[in-house]
Amino acid sequence: MSINQSLREFISNCALPANEARILLAHLLERHYQLPRSALLSRDDMRLNEQAFEEWESLVSRRMNGEPIAYILGKKGFHNIELQVGPGVLIPRPETELLVEIALSEIAKLNKPTKVLDLGTGSGAIALSIASAAPQASLLATDRSAEALAIAKHNAHFLNLTEQVQFSQGNWYEAVSPQNQFDVIVSNPPYIANQDPHLTQGDLRFEPPSALTDYASGLSCLEIIIAGADKYLKPGGLIVVEHGFDQSEAVLELMKETDLIDVQAHLDLAGHSRAASGRKRF
């Protein structure tokens, strides 16, 4: 690809899908020229300078090798915020916004200062989205990965949410004081079964395996989180977890077995059962 091409020609001649080429070019325009994405149209005859062109070739090469765009750009939009992401954390997915919406609905119903626990926070996507949208909520976000917590803390600082969201390192409830109880518990744990072929496909090849799979049936982390919820929920408190598209029945049964009430399945935008919720008895 020649440096003597316009933005329009870069997109049309790129080996990547046009939508991906536009995302990468928009990143370059912002980074090198402080121009908005709209410049792809308003200045589509523009040429890149040598430095920007070299970076363009590098970005295209990385994407052609399969690296996720979110990792290439170092950021990902989620719900109503933008997050720094990197190879140490799971890339936030649109379907996970369902957990945020369920939690926000519960917080609105309570209509009082609310305590929320986010187990396995990763980049902080769920906790920080809730905090951003619900100033009356205080959150504890946990993760066993120091690398993930460092990214989550950076995101909290960038979003000015450090007073509202606290962080703790540890494996699930091990990171939480036994005396601590919450109005809402949310979690998007690893739920892909070990040896699932999806782990070797697409973006998943680049993401941390421990954030994707439990190295077992796909249900072991969900079992721990659901089994421990009673101790850490206030009476009437809500737990909501994300799960795989084919795990709804099993997860709902886990909740019923632990004596949670008001057990419900929740559909994502594609119509798949993607989350389950239950409530501690009053």
Image (spheres, rainbow, N blue to C red):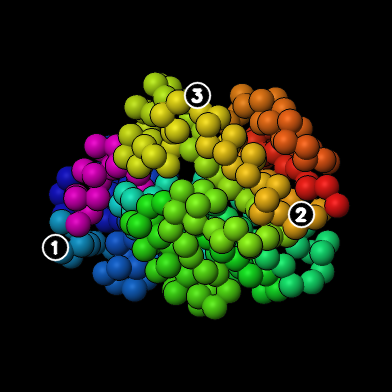
Q: Where 201 sits versus 137, above or below? A: above
| Label 2, residues with CA under 10 Å away: few <14, some 14-19, many ≥20 | many
* Number of the front mark, 1 or 3: 3
What amino acid is at disc 2?
Gly
State the mark number for residue 6.
none
Count of all numbered marks drawn on residues in the image: 3
93 vs 52, nearest the viewer: 93
Q: Is residue 142 visible?
A: yes
Instruction: From this view, report whether residue 52 is shown above or below residue 17.
Output: below
**Whole-number angstrom distance, CA of label 1 to CA of label 2:** 57 Å
The residue labelled by disc 2 is 237
Q: CA distance from mark 1 to mark 3?
A: 51 Å
The residue under label 1 is 50
The segment highlighted magenta reads 55-71
SS class, disc 1: helix
In this rendering, position of residue 114 left or right of residue 190? right
Mark 1 vs mark 2: which is more N-terminal? 1
Amino acid type of disc 3? Ser
At 17% from the left and 45% from the top, the residue drawn is 1
In which quarter of the view is residue 73 placed? bottom left
The percent position of residue 137, horizontal first and vertical second, equals 67, 69
- 139 and 270: which is toward the camera: 139
Name which residue lies at 75% across and 62% down: 107
Q: What is the chief secondary structure element of the magenta stretch?
A: helix
